[in-house]
Image (tube, rainbow, N blue to C red):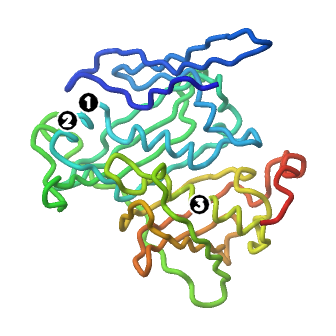
Amino acid sequence: MLVRQLNRLLLPKGSYKRQLLYLCISPRTNNNQVNARMAYEWNKDGLDLPGLPFDTFSWTGNTNLWKACQIFESNDIPRDVMIRLHETFLMFTRSAYISFTPEYYQYIAMDFPCKISTSLVSIGKSSLVSKIELLSQKHGNKSLACATYQVVAVDKGTRKSSIIPDWLREANPESTTKPRPTMMSALEIPKDDVDVFKYEVTVVPSDTDLYGHCNQNTYIRYCTDTATVAARKEKLKDFQYDMVHYTAKDVSVIYSGECTIGAVLTVHCWEDLTDNNALFFIIKSKDETIFHCTINFYSSQPTENANKSDDLASARL
């Protein structure tokens, strides 16, 4: 039974002071309560994790893609920088690229110690790009997964893009001269030759963030849920099982709009005619495209446990 989860790490402004936060779990066995604590420690080298949270994992034992991506979203800006920027600006993610190594799927577990490291890559006029890595402490901080986020500063009053403050440039002069990494291009829904599966979702309160908008990572969940429904309805040629049975190689996203509670969104999903290991998604709110996503998989063949564990999901929707 989960009794407490602290999802936000707060540090004194401009400080890398070490702090301990706890995830307290109290499972009951034969009426005897056993308390367990997982210590999350933030220091100048990053965030130390004794393992990934239990809800990162699906009923198959594989990680949920959207939950894995959420780890990077929660650490997309160095912690002390984020706290200072949020005093003045709203910070919106414009685009992101997340990649997973084969070792990620081999090593990652609830009790596998890892570290999250966040650093600034480049600072532009109104946006910054950060790099977030998930490192294996057991293997000399070997990188298991990596993400690149482009985040835009927006004025709280006018809701227009703002200039990144000088104090951040002065503290990170090397990041002001580096070019911004190339991110994905916007997608277009194909008109011919490709079957496009459509699925409607409604934004509920738990899908929103502190700005009252649909959380950026929720869109990835909408995409994988839509692909799973399409697979169960046998609308995909290359993917025939729930998405939790496939190992994603990388995820590319663009956020081009926003929505709030009650919005009815249409998720468009289609396969690549030339690459059977890729899925494409566009999410629309009415006629406005608000999200683009490409997911490349290591293979369109499911993991070894697909035939057995998929009995739980044998009923077609």
The three-letter code of the residue at mark 1 reads Asp
Residue 82 x/y as whole percent = 27, 37
The three-letter code of the residue at mark 3 reads Ile
Residue 103 x/y as whole percent = 66, 37
Q: Quick one: label 3, few (<14), some, or many (20+) residues within 10 Å?
A: many
The three-letter code of the residue at mark 2 reads Arg
Q: Which residue is mark 2?
A: 84
Q: Which residue is mark 1?
A: 80
What mark, if any, has residue 192 been given in the picture?
none
Instruction: Kindly check if marks 2 and 1 are in contact, taking CB atoms under 8 A apart as contact.
Output: yes
Instruction: Kindly check if marks 3 and 2 are in contact, taking CB atoms under 8 A apart as contact.
Output: no
Residue 119 x/y as whole percent = 34, 36
Q: Quick one: label 2, few (<14), some, or many (20+) residues within 10 Å?
A: some
Real-space Cα distance between discs 3 and 2?
A: 33 Å
Horizontal side, residue 257 vs residue 263: left or right: left
Task: Choose the circle earlier in sequence order: 3 or 1.
Answer: 1
Horizontal side, residue 12 vs residue 289: left or right: left
Q: Residue at x 74, y 57 (%)?
A: 242
